[in-house]
């Protein structure tokens, strides 16, 4: 079941995507930037097709859940169309932020989401490198919006519209937007940080359209001139472009760690705690890595200050 409005969004967005991607490919070759490769671009398209297939197969089930929630809504949505759609935009973007943060905070959900981050390239087609299994649970984050009186089909329409913006920020050609813009909205610079494997950038900038959620909840990080972005994930899989293992490799890693763990507490930790968690400390979470980096940087700063003080005497 796809609404007429969603079909119109699709009709508008497809030629838009095709045009801007072709222009970016031409520009990257003209400037010898090598932002695109055939192998990675085909993998991005493959992931998109898988995601769409799962969404189509599961759409009837999650629509039943959303319509059931709407029938038991606590309130009616705002009567003013402007207020209705304005609030829906804000609530849907917040719901995406919460979902996205959970995807980075629990290894089980990271195993689903990691496919979106596994490319060492970053370009507009990377936006289509979808988390294949995400349609199985994304609707859960929309349920609170339904209970507030917003119609299920309107929520899905808003998600489709904001996805257009979310895809268009996957570019290296736009360096910085005006300061006023970057104070409110997600920019290409913000999203490059999100796709980086540098320690300082890990698990930052989770917003789709609005960067204000990251600034409010402590996940914001600006792109630093002294820290060029390295795209991809910290540990690349053995076969990153294998048609099956590209989707399942982190689930395989979870199974290995769970099988090797001795206690149930450890087993559950390897499934539900943040990526990188280990019971013996052999691997680190992003927060632990960033804390270690902060300590090392503080030591270096103190050492140079002491050396400078000695030289100044």
Image: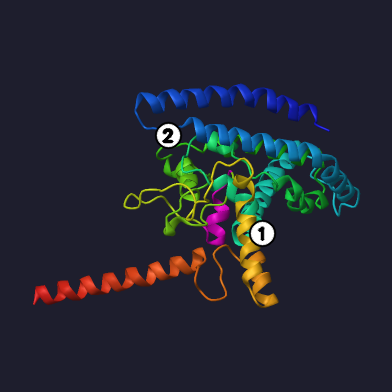
In the image, 170 versus 159, the foreground residue is: 170
Residue 143 sits inside the magenta stretch: no
In the image, 10 versus 61, the foreground residue is: 61
Q: Quadrant of the N terminus?
A: top right
In the image, 54 versus 213, the foreground residue is: 54
> Mark 2: which secondary structure?
loop
N-term-proximal mark, 2 vs 1: 2
Residue occupying the point 60% across, 32% down: 45
Residue occupying the point 44% across, 44% down: 189
Q: Can I make out residue 243 in this image?
A: yes
Residue occupying the point 52% across, 52% down: 205
Residue 140 image position (x, y, % from top left): 77, 53
**The magenta segment:** 209-219
Colouring used for the render:
rainbow
In the image, 29 versus 172, the foreground residue is: 29
Please name the residue that numbered disc 1 is placed on: 108
The numbered mark at residue 35 is: 2
- Marks 2/1: CA–CA distance: 30 Å
Quarter assignment of residue 130: top right
The numbered mark at residue 284 is: none
Residue 260 image position (x, y, % from top left): 62, 70
Residue 199 image position (x, y, % from top left): 43, 59
Taking the image as shown, residue 290 lies to the left or right of residue 131, namely left
């Amino acid at each position: 079941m796809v609404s007429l409005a969603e079909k119109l969004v699709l009709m508008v967005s497809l030629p838009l995507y095709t045009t801007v991607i072709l222009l970016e490919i031409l520009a990257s070759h003209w400037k010898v930037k090598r932002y695109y490769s055939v192998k990675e671009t085909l993998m991005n398209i493959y992931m998109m097709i898988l995601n769409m297939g799962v969404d189509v197969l599961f759409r009837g089930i999650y629509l039943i859940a959303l319509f059931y929630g709407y029938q038991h809504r606590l309130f009616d949505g705002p009567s003013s169309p402007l207020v209705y759609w304005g609030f829906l935009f804000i609530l849907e973007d917040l719901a995406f932020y919460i979902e996205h943060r959970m995807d980075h905070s629990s290894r089980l959900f990271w195993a689903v989401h990691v496919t979106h981050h596994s490319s060492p390239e970053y370009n507009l087609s990377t936006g289509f490198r979808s988390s294949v299994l995400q349609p199985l649970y994304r609707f859960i984050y929309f349920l609170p919006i339904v209970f507030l009186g917003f119609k299920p089909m309107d929520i899905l329409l808003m998600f489709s519209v904001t996805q257009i913006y979310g895809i268009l920020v996957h570019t290296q050609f736009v360096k910085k937007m005006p300061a006023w813009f970057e104070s409110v909205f997600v920019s290409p610079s913000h999203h490059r940080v999100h796709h980086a494997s540098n320690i300082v950038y890990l698990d930052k900038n989770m917003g789709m359209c609005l960067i204000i959620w990251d600034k409010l909840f402590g996940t914001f990080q600006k792109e630093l001139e002294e820290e060029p972005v390295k795209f991809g994930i910290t540990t690349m899989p053995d076969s990153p472009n294998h048609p099956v293992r590209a989707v399942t490799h982190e689930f395989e890693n979870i199974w290995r760690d769970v099988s090797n763990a001795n206690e149930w507490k450890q087993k559950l930790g390897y499934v539900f705690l943040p990526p990188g968690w280990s019971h013996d400390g052999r691997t680190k979470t992003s927060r632990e890595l960033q804390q270690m980096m902060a300590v090392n940087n503080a030591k270096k700063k103190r050492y140079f200050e002491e050396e400078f003080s000695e030289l100044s005497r």
